[in-house]
Amino acid sequence: MRHPVPPQVARRILRPQDDRFSLPGLDTVTSVELVSAIESSMMACDTAQMYADVILRHTTRLRTADTIVGNMSDLILDFHIFVGGDLTKIRLLLADLAPLPHTGDVLPTEMTRSLLQCYSGTVCSFPSILRCLKRFICEHDSEERLTSVIASHFYPPSLDQSFPARPALPRATSWTPPSPALLAVLGGKLYVNGS
């Protein structure tokens, strides 16, 4: 079973010159830093194909995650608005999104903060949730499973778990200006959308 490298270790490999006691926040590395880190961790028995396979697997996973999160961004935004960005409620969602055998295991608060990169306060931003999901969606995850899990956080378990589709926006119609008689009744002002 593979385990991710802890952020502190990854930071030391990628940027050994950085202060090792500073807060984690390493989001983006340059290609030069990545190549240097790979070269420094190579062993004599490693082959180029080993690295190609790993890079391809992760590139595919990240592209898939980007597509899934992009397709689900409206639902994720609805969830974020529903819970008001509350870190505790987002933490419960992340526990249910975790892969087996950890599904449902509530994450420690500091681990949640680290995953979301929300290091203070009790509210997490919508972009932080998106970035977290893009980073941690597994290759076996599907849009259907994730939608079902997120939808379950909107409704109590006793209710129907099927998540209603978002209402379609009305199609654009051609606009016909009001008649002069209607404008006269309105005092020459046109009121749109209740304004």
Image (cartoon, helix red, strand yellow):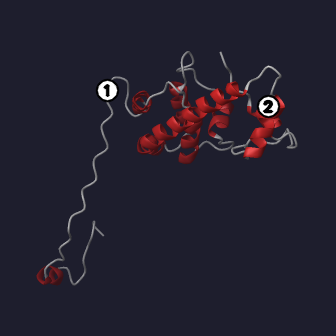
Rendering quarter of residue 102: top right
Residue 55 lies, in percent from the top left, at: 64, 32
Q: Earlier in the sequence, mark 2 or mark 1?
A: 2
Quadrant placement of the C terminus: bottom left
Q: Nearer the viewer, residue 182 or 49?
A: 49
Rendering quarter of residue 35: top right
- The disc at residue 159 is 1
- The disc at residue 66 is none
- The disc at residue 9 is 2
Which of the two marks, 2 or 1, is nearer to us in this view? 2
Circle 1: is it few (<14), some (14-19), or many (20+) Cα within 10 Å? Answer: few
Q: CA distance from mark 2 to mark 1?
A: 45 Å
What residue do we see at 39% from left, 32% from top?
Answer: 151
What residue do we see at 58% from left, 32% from top?
Answer: 136
Compared to residue 136, the image places residue 45 above or below, namely above
Q: Amino acid at mark 2?
A: Val
In-image side of 68 versus 137 (left or right): left
In-image side of 126 versus 73 (left or right): right
Q: At numbered mark 1, what does the secondary structure look like: helix, strand or loop?
A: loop
Residue 166 lies, in percent from the top left, at: 32, 44
Residue 16 lies, in percent from the top left, at: 86, 39
Residue 66 lies, in percent from the top left, at: 51, 40
Rendering quarter of residue 90: top right
Q: Nearer the viewer, residue 51 or 180?
A: 51
Q: Nearer the viewer, residue 166 or 32?
A: 32
View extreme (front): residue: 48
Q: Amino acid at mark 1?
A: Leu
In-image side of 59 versus 182 (left or right): right
Q: At numbered mark 2, what does the secondary structure look like: helix, strand or loop?
A: helix
Quadrant placement of the N terminus: top right
